[in-house]
Image: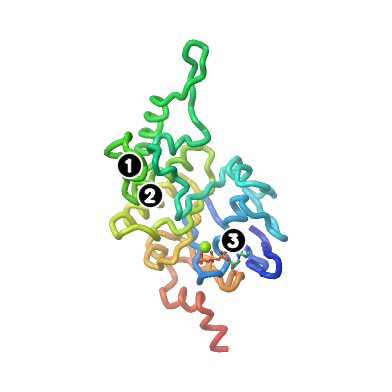
Amino acid sequence: MQNITKRFGGVTALSDVNLEAYSGEVLAIVGDNGAGKSTLIKILTGVYQPTSGEIFLGGNPVQFSSHAEATAHGIDAVYQTLALADHLDPAANMFLGNELTHKVAGMTLLDNKRMRTETERVLMERLGVRLKSLDAPTVSLSGGQRQAVAIARAVYHDDLRVLVMDEPTAALGPQETARTLKLIETVKAQGIAVILISHSLDDVLQVSDRIHVQRRGRRVGVVNTADTTIQEVLGLIVGAAEEAA
Ligand SMILES: Nc1ncnc2c1ncn2[C@@H]1O[C@H](COP(=O)(O)OP(=O)(O)OP(=O)(O)O)[C@@H](O)[C@H]1O
Ligand SMILES: [Mg+2]
């Protein structure tokens, strides 16, 4: 993303922001409330259009006028408030709006059996996850399992190139958080560029390769996770250097 600016009326949410993400890497985006993290990734995923600036995918300029267009280019997102239908089972969620069908006696019917086996296969083959029951409504799954279903839905598309996760562990306990971080590593190992927005520096230091720091609508630094400290990242987030000056 190059020189992205986004204004909402008189509010400048993003000023001239650059962001680089690479396949097989986890890029974390951190920053205080209102720093512009969600706005930035909503532009990347086609939910918002930038006021100015450009997006390049594999070096080619792209423009998304909708989330569907971004998805078609292999960019997808998993949000904290998971867009899962609680009352439907995992397979129905996996294929929501994209149902598999078959013809029976000339009629088109939902192919529930294949949706279930595909869901089972993707969860196991791509994420190493087995759900105890594929019959239960999604609301009865644990937070980590719900997260797995949401990620499975994204990685089901073989041409997924960028997966954005906005606060995936915010609502999870420690065990579920650990599982979700493992899923992130699994997705990364498949050559997908993962972008992780998180308020948990522990998670970020554990799972990211680089950290992009947003402050008041600007990118104020990018650091290699292996070479940084909590103090350095916190300093960037609160603008310590700026304040000292
Ligand atoms: N749809 C909108 N209309 C008007 N202002 C908006 C809109 N979306 C975001 N903003 C403003 O843009 C700025 C950046 O918001 P954004 O949601 O991107 O921050 P964030 O870094 O994701 O914060 P948080 O950590 O709280 O999720 C804020 O000042 C916010 O009020
Ligand atoms: Mg946000």
Q: Earlier in the sequence, mark 1 or mark 3?
A: 3
Residue 215, percent from left and from top: 56, 73
Quarter of the image where the N terminus is located: bottom right
Residue 130, percent from left and from top: 30, 39
Residue 13, percent from left and from top: 63, 67
In space, the residues marked 3 and 2 are separated at their CA atoms by: 24 Å
Binning the other alpha carbons within 10 Å of mark 1 as few (below 14), some (14 to 19) or many (20 upward) gives some
Quarter of the image where the C terminus is located: bottom right
In the rendered structure, find residue 183 and report the number of the disc placed on it: 2
Query: With respect to residue 217, does 140 lie above or below?
Result: above
Q: Amino acid at mark 2?
A: Leu
Residue matched to label 1: 129
User: In percent of the image, x 52 and y 12: which residue is there?
Assistant: 106
Q: Amino acid at mark 1?
A: Val
Q: Is mark 1 within 8 Å of ligand 2?
A: no
Dot 2: element: helix
Dot 3: element: helix
In the rendered structure, find residue 116 and report the number of the disc placed on it: none
In space, the residues marked 1 and 3 are separated at their CA atoms by: 31 Å
Query: With respect to residue 109, does 230 lie above or below?
Result: below
Tell me which image quadrant ligand 1 sits in: bottom right
Residues under numbered marks 1 and 2 in contact, where contact means CB atoms less than 8 Å apart: yes
Q: Nearer the viewer, mark 1 or mark 3?
A: 3
In space, the residues marked 1 and 2 are separated at their CA atoms by: 9 Å
Residue matched to label 3: 39
Residues under numbered marks 1 and 3 in contact, where contact means CB atoms less than 8 Å apart: no
User: In percent of the image, x 44 and y 38: which residue is there?
Assistant: 93
Binning the other alpha carbons within 10 Å of mark 2 as few (below 14), some (14 to 19) or many (20 upward) gives many
Given residues 1 and 154, the one toward you in this image is: 154
Q: Amino acid at mark 3?
A: Thr
